[in-house]
Image (cartoon, rainbow, N blue to C red):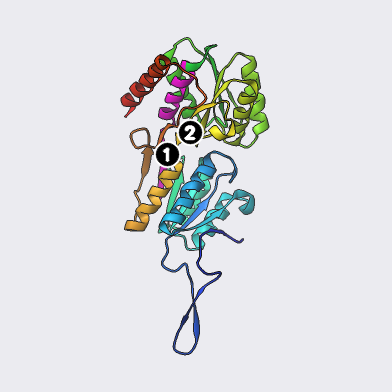
């Protein structure tokens, strides 16, 4: 299988240098830090988790001259095959984006004890795997405060991609934040069991809107993008997730719960480039570490008093969590 390189070369293939008797090819990648990435099953184009992670990789390439190779599950068939190819290709760091590849990553990590691996969104006990997780509940608590504050019906909704711990943290934080504003607020919730179906996201959102929900939030990848567009179509508010999703539904998205995966990946790659090492064990990123937060507010038309109240609630919650 041909690995895809996310690199910028100054020559088309190789640099040629003059030696004693003739020309000798020199690999332009020699001496560069190489990073291999196995994308989550949704791959690129999810307009959320994978695309934001890829933004961090692109920044590492452009600003730090890092060579990035990436594979998608559609190409490899299995995560295990992809991880093995990335190791055998000579990458200094091998990243697994998403919890779904954890078991196969741990299997490969046992076979390559000297290889450094990074698992994003799950926690592994393997000695050569650094785990990066985010305190999604903290950022989602802020999203819940926003939703409860701006809701007129006091019915809001949450759509999850799959009922697993990482997505449950989004839901739990959202509920906690909303109920801190109004203990009696009604929170509709449904799990789509799919991260890649915008039509399904729109369908679930439509049912919630029919049930009087006027602010929706999701943690469902591309399925959630369908929710955003349905919210815009039906004239209600929505809150984006992972990246700033305002541009997908500019009349609906009031803010987004930012999960700064791009910064986390860039920082760990930079650490390796500068020191030849990365932090081991479990790295957990929340509000205090700038791992999560809220995107700028848009769409909302609040009075100064209403905006002040909302800002105070968010600031208080954030200070208590940090």
Quadrant assignment, res 228: top right
Say whether disc 1 or disc 2 marks the residue closer to the N-terminus: 1
Q: Position of residue 86 (x, y in %)?
A: 52, 58
Quadrant assignment, res 43: top right
**Residue 156 seen in render:** yes
Residue ID for mark 2: 166
- Residue visible at 49% across and 56% down in the picture: 36
- Residue visible at 45% across and 31% down in the picture: 296
Q: Are marks 1 and 2 in contact (CB under 8 Å)?
A: yes
Q: Which mark is residue 101?
A: none
Q: Secondary structure at mark 1?
A: strand
Q: Position of residue 99 (x, y in %)?
A: 51, 41
Q: Which residue range is magenta in the image? A: 126-149
Instruction: Find the distance from the CA under tag 1 to the CA under tag 2.
Output: 9 Å
Q: Position of residue 101 (x, y in %)?
A: 53, 45
Residue ID for mark 1: 133
Q: Is residue 50 above or below residue 175?
A: below
Q: Secondary structure at mark 2?
A: helix
The quadrant of the rendering that contains the N terminus is bottom right
Residue 134 highlighted magenta (yes or no): yes
């Amino acid at each position: 299988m041909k690995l895809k390189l996310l690199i910028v070369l100054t020559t088309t293939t190789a640099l040629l240098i003059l030696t004693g008797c003739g020309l000798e090819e020199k690999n332009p990648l020699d001496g560069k830090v190489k990073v291999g990435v196995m994308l989550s099953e949704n791959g690129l184009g999810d307009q959320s988790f994978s695309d934001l992670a890829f933004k961090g990789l692109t920044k590492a390439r452009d600003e730090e001259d890092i060579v990035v190779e990436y594979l998608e599950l559609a190409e490899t068939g299995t995560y295990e095959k992809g991880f093995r190819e990335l190791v055998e290709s000579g990458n200094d760091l091998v990243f697994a984006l998403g919890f779904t590849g954890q078991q196969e990553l741990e299997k490969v990590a046992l076979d390559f004890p000297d290889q450094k691996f990074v698992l994003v969104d799950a926690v592994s006990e393997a000695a050569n795997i650094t785990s990066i997780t985010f305190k999604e509940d903290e950022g989602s608590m802020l999203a819940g405060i926003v939703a409860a504050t701006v809701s007129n019906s006091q019915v809001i909704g949450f759509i999850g991609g799959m009922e697993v711990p990482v997505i449950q943290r989004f839901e739990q934080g959202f509920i906690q934040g909303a109920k801190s504003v109004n203990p009696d607020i009604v929170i509709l919730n449904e799990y789509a069991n799919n991260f890649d179906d915008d039509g399904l996201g729109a369908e679930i959102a439509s049912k919630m809107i029919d049930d009087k929900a006027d602010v929706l939030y999701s943690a469902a990848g591309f399925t959630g993008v369908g929710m955003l567009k349905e919210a815009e179509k039906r004239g209600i508010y929505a809150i984006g997730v992972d990246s700033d999703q305002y541009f997908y539904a500019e009349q609906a998205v009031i803010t987004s719960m930012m999960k700064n995966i791009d910064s986390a990946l860039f920082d760990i790659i930079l650490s390796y480039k500068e020191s030849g090492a990365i932090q081991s064990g479990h790295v957990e990123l929340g509000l205090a570490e700038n791992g999560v937060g809220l995107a700028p507010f848009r769409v909302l038309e609040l009075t100064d008093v209403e905006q002040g109240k909302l800002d105070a609630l968010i600031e208080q919650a954030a200070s208590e969590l940090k």
